[in-house]
Amino acid sequence: MGRINSNVESLIARRALNTNNTSLNQALLRLSTGLRINSGRDDPAGLIASETLRSSLRAINTAVQNAVRADTIVSVAEGGLQEISSLLLELENLVDQTANEAGVTSDEVSANQLQIDSILASINRLAEATAFGGKKLLNGNLDFTTSGININEATGAALTDLDKVQVNSAKVAAGSFRQVNINVVTPSEVALVSAVAAGTDSSGVLNGTINGVTTIQIRGNLGSEILSFASGTSTATIATTIQASSELTGVSATASAATGGPASLVFQSTEYGKDQFVTISIIQNTAGFVSQAADTTDYGVNGTVTVNGANAVVAGLDVSVNSGSLAIDLRLTSTFGSTANGTTSFEIKGGGAVFSISPTVGLSGQESIGIAEVSTAKLGNKGLGFLATLGTGLANDLAAKNFTTAQKIVRASINQIATLRGRLGGFQKNTLVTTMNSLRIAAENVTAAESAIRDADFAVETSNLVRAQILVASSIQVLQLANAQPQNVLALLG
C-alpha cells in the first residue's frame, strides 16, 4: 500500500457503515412504531393500498357510530310510544267502566271524564316532549311530506281517491321527489246478498212487501241478529231495521226500487275485502222472499292494486307496499277502491327520519322511517273520529254516551300506536342491528387487510435489528482499520 491521498478501503468501509446504520435505524423505527410502512419510500404501492383501506375503515366505523345513534333515537321514540300505549289502555278502561251505566253514579262519570281529560293532555304532552338532543320525535317533524293529495282528516272532508296515506319509508334525493302512482286494476267488493220480497198486490204483482210473518237471521263479521217482521212489511222498512243494527252485525241493507221490476232488498257487508261475509238465513216463512234460498252466504273480494307498477298487498280498501326504496300504507275511498281501472298519484317531497348507516354517503346508503304525529288530534281516523273528541264537551265525551264509538276510537288509537311501535322495532332489529353487525365484521376484515400491508412483523424486525447492530459494530471496526492503514507508509520514510 503506497498511496494515501485516496483511501479506497476507508471509503468502502464508510459506505458500508452508512448502509448498515440505515438498516439499524429502519429496524428501530419499525419496532418503535409497530409499522412496516412509515413513509412513502418504505413501500409506495403498499402505502397507497393501506391509506385506501384506512379511509374505508374510518368510514365503516363512522357508519357503525351513526347506526348506534339511530338505534338510540328510535329507542327514545319507542319509549314515548310505550307510555302513550299505557295511557290508552287506561283510557279504554275508563270508557268501558262508564259504559256500565246502571253501575256508576253521575259523580263517578264526572270523575272518569276528568281522568280522560288528564290522559288526553298527557298524550299531547308526550307527543311534544319526547325528544333527542332537542329534536322532537313524535310531533310529526319526522313524518314524510307529500303533495298532490287531498286529505283533511281534521275536518273529515270528502275525498276523491284516498282516505289515508302513511309513508313508512322512502328514498328521496335531496331537492327531488318520488312519484307514487296507484292503479286499481280490479276493484275490491263487499259481500252482497239480494232478495225480492214475495208479497203481491190484488193483481198478483210483486209490490215490495213480505207475504207473511217472516223471521230472518243476519250474520256478518261483527255478529248475528234475529229479526221478525209482520206480514206486509215493506222492504224499505226491513232495510231501515237492519241498518239500525249494522254495528252489531257488520251488515247493512238498502231497498232498491228497480225500474220495471219489483223492489230488491240488498244486504251487504259494511267493509270491503275477502274477510267480509254476509249470511242470510230464513228461519220462518221461507217463501217470504223469491230468489232467496233458506241459507245464502256471500264473501267480499280483495281487488288488485299496483303501486308504481308493483303489485300491492290489498285487504279490502287497505293497500300496502314494501320495497327497498318505498314502503307505504294507503286506505282508498270506497268510490275509488271499488272502481276498476281507476288511477291516482301523489308525490313524496321528502322528510322522515333519515339515517346514513353506510360507509358510502349517498341515497343508496340511507335508510329512512316515517314517524307520524301521535297527538290526540291524529290518533283515531276520519271515519270514526279522533281521540280528541273524547274530551269534555266534545262529540264523544262520557256525557254524550257514545260508548261504542268512543271504544272504537280508543282501540283504533291503540292499534296505531302498536303498529308504529312494531315498525320502529322492526327497523331497529332488521335494519340497524343487522347493519351494525355486518359493518363490524367488515371493519374486522378491513383492519386485518390493512394490518397485513402496513404493520411490522416483530419477529422479522428484531432479527433485522440484531443483524444491523452486528454489521454496524463490524463496520466501525473495519473503518478504524482502514483509516489506520495509511500510517504504514511512515515506515518507508524511516
Image: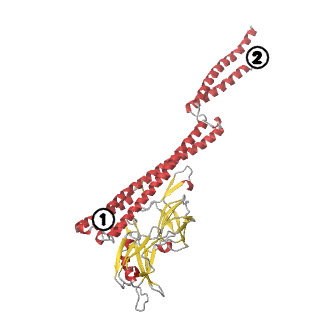
- Vertical comparison of 266 with 380: above or below: below
Q: Residue at the far bottom: name it.
A: 203
Q: Identify which residue, 460 or 486, lies in the foreground.
A: 460
Kindly identify the residue that appears in the image at 50 percent across and 48 percent down. 436
Q: Identify which residue, 228 or 444, lies in the foreground.
A: 228
According to the picture, the residue beneath numbered tag 2 turns out to be 3
- Vertical comparison of 487 with 274: above or below: above
Q: Using the rendered image of the protein, determine whether residue 270 is visible from the camera's viewpoint.
A: no
**Amino acid identity at mark 2:** Arg
Local crowd size for mark 1, using a 10 Å CA cut-off: few (<14), some (14–19), many (≥20):
some
Badge 1 marks a residue whose secondary structure is: helix
Local crowd size for mark 2, using a 10 Å CA cut-off: few (<14), some (14–19), many (≥20):
few
Q: Residue at the far right: name it.
A: 2
Picture quadrant of residue 249: bottom left
Badge 2 marks a residue whose secondary structure is: loop
- Vertical comparison of 433 with 391: above or below: above
Q: Which mark is residue 408?
A: none
Q: Position of residue 25 (x, y in %)?
A: 61, 28
Marks 2 and 1, how far apart in space?
A: 119 Å
Q: Identify which residue, 232 or 473, lies in the foreground.
A: 232
Q: Using the rendered image of the protein, determine whether residue 355 is visible from the camera's viewpoint.
A: yes
Q: Residue at the far top: name it.
A: 494
Q: Position of residue 316 (x, y in %)?
A: 47, 68
Q: Which mark is residue 96?
A: 1
For the N terminus, the image quarter is: top right
Q: Position of residue 351 (x, y in %)?
A: 49, 61
**Amino acid identity at mark 1:** Asp
Q: Position of residue 449 (x, y in %)?
A: 59, 40
Kindly identify the residue that appears in the image at 66 percent across and 26 percent down. 19
For the C terminus, the image quarter is: top right
Kindly identify the residue that appears in the image at 54 percent across and 46 percent down. 60
How many numbered marks are there?
2
